[in-house]
Image (spheres, helix red, strand yellow):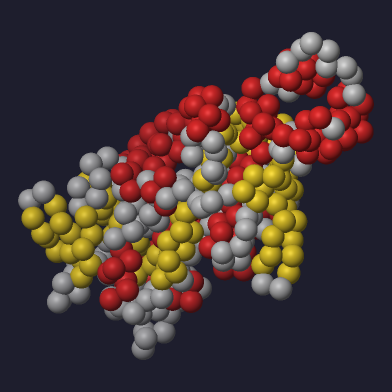
Amino acid sequence: MDSCVVIGSGPAGLMAADMVLSAGIAVDLYEAMPTPARKLLAAGGGGLNLTTEEEFAVFLSRYPGRDKELSPFLRDFGPGEARAWAQSLGVATTVGASGRVYPVSRTSVELTRNWLSRLENLGLRLRLGYRWQGWDEAGRLRFMTEKGQCAVCAKATVLALGGGSHPQLGATGEWRRILARLGCAIAPFRPANCGFEVDFSAHFRERFAATRPPLKNVILTFQGEKGNFRFRFQRRGECLVTEYGLEGSLLYACGFLLRDSLEAGRPTRLHLDLFPDSSSATLATKLRRPQGSRSLAAYLEKCLRLTGVRRGLAYEFIDKALFAAPEALAAALKDVVIPLRRPRPLAEAISTAGGLCFAELDDHLMLRRRPGLFCCGEMLDWEAPTGGYLLTACLATGRAAGLAAKDWLEQGAALGKSGGGNYDFSI
């Protein structure tokens, strides 16, 4: 039987290869970088969030605007299946208080090492330093290597080429140019799970931002518009103050709303409650205590324990006149308004929005314009916040593409044709 070609060694590509190899079909995996799985290894540097355990309807809602397209793949491979898959690699997982699932080791090293070892034992042929260039006149896959160009015949190909964030790890988005020549619709790349720029004063940047202090236990609120509807997003958590602005899990959770609002040219403001466990009345009562000879900073520290970056944000964004009025200052501390300027560049983002439109693919993730070519992972037009949603969907679509490529080769071989799966050969 003909072998399968997989291009890209991220989670989606490795999962596609796993599915084909497990069926006893040979796989040649081509990767442009000198080592495989670079982004997966980088993602585990601060703790690999594999998935999140929650009701499926809630889990599916984390994929804004693409829940319908991704639903069949995530139903087949969701949080429970992701944990079982990790266990099959000898990687135990643990569930945090928020439902987030991590390897017990907290890193991606063990999982990646065990996974690559299993694929090698199944016969994976890993080709490193091969950058895909499209097809030649004979329909063969073209690759650029250190030794020059080469051409490869493939009856089934899985593309898992990623988005455009962190291009130094291998996802450059160059595939868009190739598929665009086929006439494929590709949504523009945009940053997802990224930071947002804020016009901090020079004093604030020098005093606070350089150390990237965490801002813990705050409530972020964002009110915006989408079409003819107004919405209100609110969540408790933490974020980071940086030299350019704000980033972190709270921003990532509503990042697509903030980004879309900014792109629409609307004034986009975050509201932060710096004291979520105290009412305005409680804060006002404490602020009525006499200041005496204390400095304002010492007074606020004594009354409210307002110190560090919280105090810096209060000074930065609350009208100075309000500091003399306890009720007004209390209300302002529970509603610090921070205008945003723009999202950070795509290259800095954790993930990518946009990509190959689902309308270009059939139900098996096969490109309608080129039978036998399957696409998966972050190169497709979807996005999700951090919390394991990105990795789970990459694994789920990689699994689906791999199984479809396997079917294509198996049924094509049975019919004595070049491929076919559950497809009409008259395509």
Q: Residue furthest top?
A: 293
The mark total stands at 0
Q: Is residue 271 left or right of residue 64?
A: right
Q: Nearer the viewer, residue 354 or 275?
A: 275
Q: Nearer the viewer, residue 158 or 23?
A: 158
The image quadrant of residue 371 is bottom left
Q: How far across and how far down the image is residue 383, in percent?
A: 53, 57
Q: Residue at x 37, y 86 (%)?
A: 427
Instruction: For the N terminus, give its image quadrant.
Output: bottom left
Q: Residue at x 42, y 50 (%)?
A: 345
Q: Residue at x 51, y 52 (%)?
A: 342
Q: Is residue 247 visible?
A: no
Q: Nearer the viewer, residue 369 or 413?
A: 369
Q: Nearer the viewer, residue 395 or 149?
A: 149
Q: Residue at x 61, y 62 (%)?
A: 266
Q: Is residue 114 left or right of residue 338?
A: left
Q: How far across and how far down the image is residue 378, in percent?
A: 44, 56
Q: Residue furthest bottom?
A: 426
Q: Residue furthest left?
A: 147
Image: 299 above or below 311: above
Image: 280 above or below 300: below
Q: How far across and how far down the image is residue 393, in percent?
A: 53, 54
Q: Is residue 166 visible?
A: yes
Image: 381 above or below 80: below
